Image (cartoon, grey):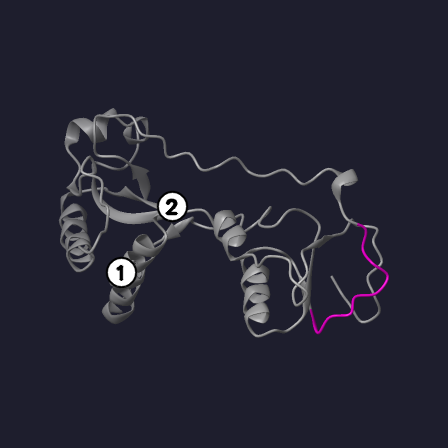
């Protein structure tokens, strides 16, 4: 699946730069004891979400991480709020439509953290191209609830001149592509958005180095 725009105008698809670890001198020293009910290792999306839920329930917690909040979140993530196009191939239409509805909801409530993109699904021959057009057509039909959809993005069959202008189409097995819609996002932003403010019931992250000794009963 190749991300691309079906438009003549340039548009950057680059993700924000990968965050560097904070300098050693800026890291807080790990206290000798931590008087909290819950200890969380890792300030990624799961650690941030768990800390938020605990705060909402007035449960004290401390989050320990060797870097910044969301600093190394989901390195291999697809960075997508996808509608579940893979479920179409397995015939799980119900799961796919739930994903499409959730995608539209996220775009409505948090447009600052995501944006629409057109992706290319390449095909090797006529029959595969026809099957892609039919399947992806259903996907985009059921997923036609696309708030703030950019007018410059085009779905369906990729015009040959645009496909051949893409360097990745040269000297390969593919003869064309079909474009479908999905929503890009960045895990790091969600980690920081979910992060609860420092309160007596939920401390800010305490950063530790490789040589730090954790309190008794704690493991990395």
Which quarter of the figure has residue 165? top left
Of the two numbered discs 1 and 2 in the rendering, the one whose residue sits closer to the viewer: 2
Q: Which residue bears the numbered disc 2? A: 112
Does 30 lie within the magenta span? Answer: yes
Give the magenta part as a residue range: 29-38
- As drawn, the residue found furthest toward the front would be 200
Q: Nearer the viewer, residue 202 or 150?
A: 202
Where is residue 179 shown, x and y percent of the image?
22, 43
In this rendering, the count of numbered labels is: 2
| Quarter-of-image position of residue 48 | bottom right
On the image, the x and y values in percent for residue 86 come to 31, 59
9, above or below 27, in the image: above
Query: Horizontally, is 112 left or right of 173 in the view?
Result: right
Q: Which residue is mark 1?
A: 100
Instruction: Reply above or below: 147 against 165.
Output: below
Q: Which callout, 1 or 2, points at the residue further toward the start of the chain?
A: 1
The answer for how far apart the CA atoms under marks 1 and 2 are is: 19 Å
Residue at the image point whose x is 67% and y is 56% from the top: 204
For the N terminus, which image quadrant?
top left
């Amino acid at each position: 699946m190749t991300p691309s725009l079906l438009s003549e105008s340039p548009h950057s698809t680059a993700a924000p730069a990968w965050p560097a670890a904070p300098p050693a001198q800026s890291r807080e020293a790990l206290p000798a004891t931590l008087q909290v009910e819950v200890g969380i290792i890792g300030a990624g999306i799961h650690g941030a979400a768990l800390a938020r839920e605990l705060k909402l329930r007035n449960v004290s917690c401390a989050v320990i991480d060797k870097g910044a909040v969301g600093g190394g979140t989901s390195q291999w993530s697809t960075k997508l709020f996808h509608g579940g196009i893979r479920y179409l191939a397995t015939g799980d239409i119900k799961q796919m439509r739930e994903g499409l509805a959730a995608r539209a909801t996220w775009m409505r409530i948090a447009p600052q953290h995501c944006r629409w993109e057109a992706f290319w699904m390449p095909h090797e021959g006529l029959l595969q191209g026809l099957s892609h057009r039919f399947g992806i057509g259903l996907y985009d039909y059921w997923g036609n609830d696309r708030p703030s959809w950019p007018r410059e993005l085009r779905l369906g069959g990729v015009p040959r001149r645009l496909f051949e202008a893409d360097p990745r189409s040269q000297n390969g097995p593919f003869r064309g592509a079909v474009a479908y819609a999905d929503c890009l996002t960045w895990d790091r932003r969600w980690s920081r958005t979910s992060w609860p403010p420092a309160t007596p019931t939920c401390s800010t992250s305490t950063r530790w180095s490789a040589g730090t000794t954790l309190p008794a009963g704690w493991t990395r």
